[in-house]
Amino acid sequence: MKFHGSSLLSLLLVYCTTIEIRASVINVSNSQEFQQALDAAQPGDEITLQSGIGILKGPFVATPSGTLDAPIKITGAEGASGFIKSEQATGLSITGNYWRIEGIHFLITKPSVGVIISGNNNLISNVLISGIESGLQVTGNENVVKNCVISASQGSGLFVGGNNNEFESNVFSSPITAATLNGCCGKFYGDVFNGDVIVQGLSSSASMKTVRTSQELQDALNQASAGDVITLAPVTFRGEFLAKQSGAPSNPITIVAGLSIRKHPKIVGNGGGAGLTITGNYWNLKYFAMSDYDVGVLVKGAGNLVDGLSISNANKAVVVKGKGNAIKNCAIDNSHLGIKVDASNCLLSSNSIQGSGASLLVSKGTCCGRLEYNVASGKVEVQGSGYSISGNVFTGPTYPASLSDL
């Protein structure tokens, strides 16, 4: 049989249409419908928990697999307040590959595990998991867990047995062990560990330490290497601290606050000295409080990030002397000078600087930094050149009078 070009093209289009993956949106409103949807799921399907669904009683198992281009999704409808509860075994076991789970609450009330991921290439994000023996177990490979809050009351908040899994911006908590790491070559980015971390395998070359005393904090700073995470327990640390080691551009050293409903970590001085001096490069400081120093944070190294700190009662809250540093999302009050920048190519973004003292001073001879979305009630003075300045709210005096002209 002979086909003309146009006829052949038409046949190809018909053929491609017949093999197209036809995804479905599957709305579920009870436990039976949820397991049936899990069993029947095809690549590209989206299983949606309906608003007002209440409690889904597990355990549940997800055995089918999606594909890289057409994963299977489990989400909650807008306004959905339901959660998955299991009084035995595991809340949800994901044995398939390429699942995407977002915005679900797993509550486990009997000795068991919240979620087990034994499949590969799955993603869990914005999920709350409360388990007994373990909150989350990841025994598959190349999975991603991000922006989740995961806890266990009698075991490890996180257990990792697979390889090449990635974790980002999660909170892992347990009075026993926050995380137990086996496997190989995992990565952690900005995760918070409330409790001890046990490294039994080669999950990461980095170490994760929770410190509870001033001496433990300084020891951890002295021993830190690229990728390490130092979590501050919700206590008060007193003294002046020095961070002289260096991370790497893609693998910084992180100091982060451990979260507690009742109390947050705070570094406190006696009115003099510098609370935390960073002479190394590529450190990330996140979410803790400081007070009562001559200088709260003194940044001498390069490529460092100060993010989300609360600093009060300091002569100078933050002084930056190294190039290419970033100060973001900080709340500064009751300080004689909020932020002083003595180096080039630095970023000041989304900071709130309140009080009767000067807010920002960018020194003469510096160049080419950015000031964006900051709120300042005191004097703002930019003596450097080549700065990008946008989106700020400056209610005090400024020099030059119109900073937007720079």
Image (cartoon, helix red, strand yellow):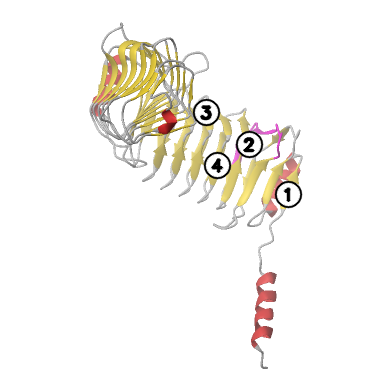
Quarter of the figure with residue 1: bottom right
Q: Residue at x 67, y 75 (%)?
A: 13
Please state the total of marks drawn on the protein image. Answer: 4
Residue 182 location (% of width, % of height): 39, 40
Position above or below: 133 against 295 = below
Tag 3 secondary structure: strand
Q: Earlier in the sequence, mark 1 or mark 4?
A: 1
Q: Which residue is mark 2?
A: 104
State the CA–CA distance, disc 1 to disc 2: 16 Å
Given the image, on which type of amino acid does mark 1 rest? Ile
Q: Earlier in the sequence, mark 3 or mark 4?
A: 4
Q: Which residue is mark 1?
A: 26
Which dot marks residue 151?
3
Q: Earlier in the sequence, mark 1 or mark 2?
A: 1
Q: Earlier in the sequence, mark 4 or mark 2?
A: 2
Residue 275 location (% of width, % of height): 30, 16
The residue range painted magenta reads: 77-92
Which dot marks residue 124?
4
Residue 117 location (% of width, % of height): 53, 44
